[in-house]
Image (tube, rainbow, N blue to C red):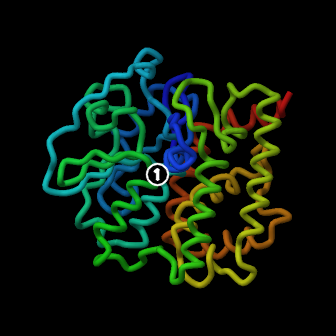
Amino acid sequence: AFEARPPPSEICCDHSSDMSRARHSSRDIEFDLPGALDDMAGLASKAAIGHGARDVEVFGNGRQGRPAERQSCDVQPPPAASKKDTVVIISTNNPGRLMLFAALNPKLGEVIDWKTPADYGGFGGDEFAKVSPQKLCPVALTAGGLRLFESDVILSYVADKYAPLLENDCRGPTVEARALSALLVRVHDMYISGTNCSQPQFFSNQAVFYKAAMPGPERAARLKDLLKQLDLVESLLPPAGPYCVGDAISFADVVLYPTVAMMQDQAAASLVGSITEGRPKLAAWLAHCNADPRFRGVADKIKAFVDTFLGKAVAGITAKGCG
């Protein structure tokens, strides 16, 4: 998930309860990127998830609008409902869970109309504001006229509505497996990828390696906490794997993989370094998932964006450190 236009905010919203914060922290990465990202979205190919969606290489769930637009509290009415559900995505780590779920369940391409912000005039336009009240991705427009946002909410909706079509429902085979999956998702969404504030200059832990505007002391604290959360994930993974809760793919795999793969793909250049070093269960899990083309295909799209648009930022932060 990426955002265009400096300075983008993280894709988090402020909510009143812990439950709300958990549900609303699954936002994509926010980046200081040029407004040309909307142009790139328009030129992207129709291969984002193998379902006819254009692969928008924009990172983050942050607002793409200009500062005045980011501060706007106006909520536009959603567009009229279509005959099919529409899901608007960008190729970043939190929308990546929807991309991966779709890759694991190819029949979703027949029943969902996959779009990108470019189909609505780009992140900064009024048309996209009608689709996404916070000008964030992902967002879903249901056939019944409901407008949904937040990655985990859309994933749950898709999994429920299209259950008969799914080859991999990712729910976990037992009560214990489902509880462990939910816990891993919560750790990711609250403590790795989430900020819970949509205003500028608020950051997630994962932003330590690519967000140049983060103050040095905050970067140091967030890096320490990010490594702590990764250690926690390591402790929760079953010894034998191969997936997050055992033999079956769960929502934990679908949620964690795009983020973990993104960070590990940047290990050589990133301030964070290798996140699998010293974490053998996480390393084995990642290697197992990487061997599956359905998983690796999603990671490659995210990696291509980071390499192209964030390489200089990542290198600059690494060279500067937390000073």
The picture places residue 67, in percent across and down from the top left corner, at: 47, 17
Find numbered disc 1 in the image and state the secondary structure of the residue it sits on.
loop
Q: Is residue 94 left or right of residue 50?
A: right
Residue located 64% across and 34% down the image: 203
Q: Is residue 277 left or right of residue 209?
A: right
Residue located 44% across and 29% down the image: 64
Quarter that holds the C terminus: top right
The picture places residue 37, in percent across and down from the top left corner, at: 44, 33
Closest to the observer, 142 or 55: 142
Residue located 86% across and 64% down the image: 278
Residue type of the residue flagged with mark 1: Pro
Closest to the observer, 269 or 255: 255
Total numbered badges shown on the rendered structure: 1
The picture places residue 271, in percent across and down from the top left corner, at: 79, 42
Closest to the observer, 291 or 172: 172
Return the residue at label 1.
95
Q: Is residue 8 left or right of residue 226?
A: left
Residue located 62% across and 71% down the image: 180
Residue 7, compared with residue 189, is above or below; it is above
Residue 36, compared with residue 205, is above or below; it is above
Q: Is residue 313 left or right of residue 235?
A: left
Q: Callout 1: 10 Å neighbours few (<14), some, many (20+)?
A: many
